[in-house]
Image (cartoon, coloured by chain):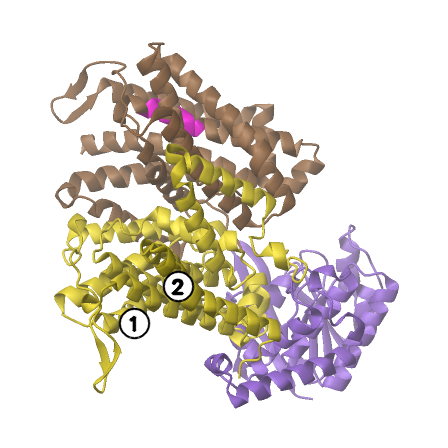
């Protein structure tokens, strides 16, 4: 297996505070890798650096050997690394279908002026966006809510909509920001199935940061564990479950739920 | 190319008839040629307001359109009086120059959001007024006066537009010119809003982070939109200068910038034609209240406040509120 | 040099007070109060009426300015901004309302006080003269001292009284303040009233020096916006810093560039734009978005 995404000695400092210290691991093609850790471990900072929403202080992130850290987010997206957000970040006054159509921006062949003048390529694009959107909606099982305005959707659907928007860009790597946060057991399980399905059928490599251990154990091929900004373990779910440092880290922070 | 529904065709037809037939005929019958000037003003202000509306479409409250209207007016006036250029060539140049300046200014300030952007654009209007006062080329507070009326525009010996100075009623000519410009502006706006660029604007209006995460170059689109918006401001201002045949630093001030914004808000931010309706209503409303003499401002502002309280989404929301949710 | 310094302090203290009111309203309700300049003008006219026309002592005039604007601010919040904010949190709704309000107050001032420039008798006569190195009329010094006392008073009020603490909590996090049991409606009203009162107080103070006229509202609002942008919106220390900085820039600019007229303001505007390009949140504002 080759490394698709490499996180090389990535460090982030905010003033005197070190949020991530010298993190190194890689994500292989077509795997699901989860980054976990107790609150304040530096998961979301790392996540933002991988998606270029934050610059790194030191180190770099490579995609197929090419540096993608410290670029602007839309350029990273163009290279095929697309992140999702937690559920409040959606296009509130668009319907599900409209959101998915807008999100296919990267698939557009015609220029913006082309759309304005209504060139042939633009018409073909518009048609292809529609087909692709309908396909995706069916794939994600969202046909019933396709015409609903996002602001009217319940929370569970919003998470799926976020993933749908990400998938609409036809990414190679999908970065998921706490996809299971605040979900009950059933919701978590259907989300686990959905992410699996995305990986299996859309051939998307998935990197996610998550708090919920039980979901992570079920879904991940490999897991990276952070604690206080340091990477303390890397391995398969089984290895992680038996890693003493991980257990200690989780037991050490009493306010955290332990799902092992 | 344009896929319009039947109602839209009828609407467009009624609109064209009103602008190009009903209004001129009514004015002729009533003999109120002064109304040409009023309607021309409405049209030009609507063009400038369209720019403000467009900036709102990417989620920025623009209270600086007066700056670009002033800029356009000066550029055209200077080109016509000092370089002897034809007004018809100076008009697009005024728009393009305004767009160019908008790009330069937009690079730093478009990073600001919400009230911060609103404040800085308001300040911008003041900056332009002061610049006009300070620069030698704008002739300071004295302004540029006796600008000649637009001359003839001919292509290959064919006269497209006659020399305005030879006409019996230049006001009528200005009216038609403005009407054509306004129709072009709003047709372009409609097209833009319903094309991919418009969709991307909407995505940015709702969430810039998410838009950039799906690969939209938000900085680029912000600049493009701001430039287009300022182009409208520049063209509107240049026309105004030509009609008044003079430009002063006070031709467009902070109050004008605020009015452009009010036109858009009142018409409705969710509707392309909002700024047109808003300008029309506010301008005529103000004119109608003239009879109340010193109470004009009081009644005007009270009605305005009342409208904001009862119609937060603008006048057009009255008819269309069921069709589109406007909650942000 | 001493003269510029003194002028800077004098201008800065006035400006800081204006900015304080604006930033307080902004921090509490996320409202950009376009009508702030008009409130200032109104305050000036009230003092003019009581002190200049009716012959009451100056202090009574000031007090009436404060009371009038406090009551007006409270009413405006209760019947205009409050309901609009409840219905939609969109910034443009309140901005539009504030613009309408600015027109409305302009109209009221025009009807009640007319459009003439009005002045009042000097509150103290004489000029302080230190060897011609520093010349300043006594009334300016007195106004400057009063302004500084008011600012200090305001800070102490915000820091140590129950109301002040509640207002600060509200400014920091509306929802959290509500959960802590702060009566959000009531304190929004008080906060808005206080902000308006500060504007009125400066108007009352400055009418003794510059006089007052209808046209001063808009430019005052613009200056207040600039100060708030320099210092960072919604931060008390930022408003004070912004006011003092603008005061000094103006004092220096007018001294150095007086023969070029309005170029001072142009330079200030341009530098503000460059400054904001690098530090969009202002000196002390929190980074956002």
Q: Residue furthest top?
A: C56
Chain of residue at mark 1: B
Q: Residue C106, image x and y in percent?
A: 39, 34
Q: Residue at x 51, y 55 (%)?
A: B267
Q: Residue A63, how many percent across, how many down? A: 58, 81
Query: Is A111 left, or right, of A26 in this rendering?
Result: left
Q: Tell me if residue C160 comes above or below residue B193 in the rendering.
A: above
User: Is B250 placed left or right of C110 in the picture?
Assistant: left
How many labels, in total?
2
- Which numbered mark, 1 or 2, is in the foreground of this view? 2
Q: Which residue is mark 1?
A: B92
**Residue C272 visible somewhere in the drawing:** no
Q: Which chain is brown?
A: C
Query: Does the magenta run of residues contain C9?
Result: no
Q: Name the tint of chain A in the rendering.
A: purple
**Pointer 2 residue:** B25
Q: Rounded to the nearest whole Å, what is the CA distance between mark 1 and mark 2?
A: 30 Å
Q: Position of residue C283 (x, y in %)?
A: 41, 46
* Front residue of A223 and B231: B231
Q: Residue at the front extreme? A: B29
Q: Chain of mark 2?
A: B
Instruction: Give the magenta part as a residue range.
Output: C198-206
Q: Colour of chain B?
A: yellow
> What secondary structure characterizes most of the magenta part?
helix
Q: Nearer the viewer, residue B89 or C208?
A: B89
**Which quadrant of the view contains residue C109?**
top left
Residue B84, compared with residue B280, is above or below; it is: below
In the picture provided, is A173 more to the left or to the right than C260?
Answer: right
């Amino acid at each position: 297996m080759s490394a698709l995404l490499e996180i090389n000695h990535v460090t982030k400092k905010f003033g005197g505070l070190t949020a991530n210290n010298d993190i190194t691991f890689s994500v292989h093609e077509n795997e699901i890798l989860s980054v976990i850790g107790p609150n304040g471990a530096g998961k979301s900072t790392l996540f933002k650096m991988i998606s270029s929403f934050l610059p790194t202080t030191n180190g770099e992130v490579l995609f197929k050997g090419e540096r993608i850290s410290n670029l602007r987010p839309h350029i990273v997206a163009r290279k095929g690394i697309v992140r999702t957000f937690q559920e409040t970040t959606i296009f509130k006054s668009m319907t599900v279908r409209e959101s998915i159509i807008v999100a296919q921006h990267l698939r557009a062949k015609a220029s913006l002026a082309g759309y304005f003048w209504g060139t042939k390529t633009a018409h073909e694009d518009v048609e292809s966006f529609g087909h692709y959107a309908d396909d995706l909606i069916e794939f994600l099982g969202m046909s019933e809510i396709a015409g609903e305005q996002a602001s009217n959707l319940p929370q569970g659907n919003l998470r799926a909509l976020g993933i749908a928007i990400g998938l609409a860009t036809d990414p190679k790597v999908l970065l998921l920001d706490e996809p299971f946060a605040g979900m009950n057991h059933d919701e978590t399980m259907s989300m686990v199935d959905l992410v699996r399905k995305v990986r299996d059928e859309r051939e998307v490599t998935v990197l996610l940061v998550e708090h919920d251990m039980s979901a992570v154990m079920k879904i991940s091929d490999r897991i990276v564990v952070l604690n206080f900004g340091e990477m303390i373990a890397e391995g398969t779910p089984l290895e992680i479950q038996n890693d003493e440092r991980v257990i200690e880290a989780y037991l050490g922070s009493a306010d955290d739920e332990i799902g092992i | 190319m344009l896929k319009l529904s039947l109602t839209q065709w009828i609407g467009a037809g009624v609109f064209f008839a009103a602008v190009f037939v009903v209004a001129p005929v009514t004015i002729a019958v009533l003999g109120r040629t002064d109304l040409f000037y009023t309607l021309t003003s409405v049209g030009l202000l609507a063009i400038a307001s369209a720019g403000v509306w467009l900036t709102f479409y990417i989620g920025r409250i623009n209270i600086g359109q007066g700056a670009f209207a002033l800029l356009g007016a000066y550029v055209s006036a200077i080109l016509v009086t000092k370089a002897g250029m034809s007004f018809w060539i100076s008009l697009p140049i005024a728009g393009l120059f305004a767009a160019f300046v908008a790009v330069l200014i937009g690079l730093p300030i478009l990073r600001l959001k919400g009230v911060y952007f609103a404040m800085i654009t308001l300040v911008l209007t003041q900056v332009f007024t002061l610049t006009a006062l300070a620069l030698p080329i704008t002739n300071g507070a004295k302004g540029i006066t006796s600008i000649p009326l637009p001359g003839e525009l001919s292509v290959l010996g064919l006269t497209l537009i006659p020399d305005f100075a030879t006409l019996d009623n230049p006001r009528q000519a200005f009216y038609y010119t403005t009407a054509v410009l306004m129709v072009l502006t709003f047709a372009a706006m409609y097209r833009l809003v319903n094309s991919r660029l418009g969709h991307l604007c909407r995505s940015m209006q709702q969430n810039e982070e998410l838009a950039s995460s799906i690969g939209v170059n938000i900085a680029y689109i912000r600049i493009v939109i701001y430039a287009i918006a300022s182009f409208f401001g520049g063209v509107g201002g240049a026309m105004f200068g030509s009609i008044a045949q003079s430009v002063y630093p006070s031709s467009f001030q902070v109050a004008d910038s605020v009015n452009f914004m009010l036109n858009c808000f009142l018409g409705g931010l969710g509707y392309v034609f909002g700024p047109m309706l808003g300008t029309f209503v506010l301008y005529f409303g103000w004119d109608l209240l003239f009879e109340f003499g010193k109470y004009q401002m009081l009644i005007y502002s009270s009605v305005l406040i009342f409208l904001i309280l009862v119609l937060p989404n603008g006048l057009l929301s009255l008819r269309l509120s069921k069709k589109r949710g406007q909650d942000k | 040099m001493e003269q510029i310094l003194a002028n800077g302090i004098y201008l800065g203290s006035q400006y800081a007070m204006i900015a304080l009111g604006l930033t307080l309203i902004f921090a509490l309700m996320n409202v950009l109060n376009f009508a702030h300049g008009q409130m200032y003008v109104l305050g000036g006219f009230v003092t003019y009426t009581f002190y200049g026309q009716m012959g009451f002592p100056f202090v009574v005039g000031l007090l009436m300015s404060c009371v009038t604007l406090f009551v007006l601010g409270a009413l405006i919040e209760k019947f205009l901004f409050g309901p609009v904010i409840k219905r939609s949190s969109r910034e443009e709704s309140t901005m539009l309302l504030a613009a309408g309000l600015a027109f409305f107050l302009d109209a009221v001032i025009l009807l009640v006080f007319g459009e003439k420039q009005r002045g009042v008798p000097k509150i103290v006569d004489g000029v302080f003269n230190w060897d011609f190195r520093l010349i300043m009329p006594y009334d300016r010094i007195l106004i400057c001292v009063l302004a500084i006392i008011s600012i200090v008073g305001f800070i102490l009020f915000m820091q140590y009284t129950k109301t002040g603490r509640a207002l600060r909590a509200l400014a920091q996090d509306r929802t959290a303040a509500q959960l802590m049991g702060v009566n959000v409606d009531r304190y929004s009203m008080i906060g808005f009233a206080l902000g308006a009162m500060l504007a009125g107080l400066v108007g009352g103070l400055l009418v003794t020096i510059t006089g007052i006229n209808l046209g001063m509202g808009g430019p005052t609002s613009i200056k207040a916006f600039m100060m708030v942008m320099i210092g960072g919106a919604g931060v008390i220390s930022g408003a004070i810093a912004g006011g003092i900085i603008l005061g000094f820039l103006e004092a220096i600019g007018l001294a150095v560039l007086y023969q070029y007229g309005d170029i001072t303001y142009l330079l200030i505007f341009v530098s503000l734009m460059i400054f904001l390009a690098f530090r969009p949140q202002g000196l002390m504002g929190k980074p956002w978005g």
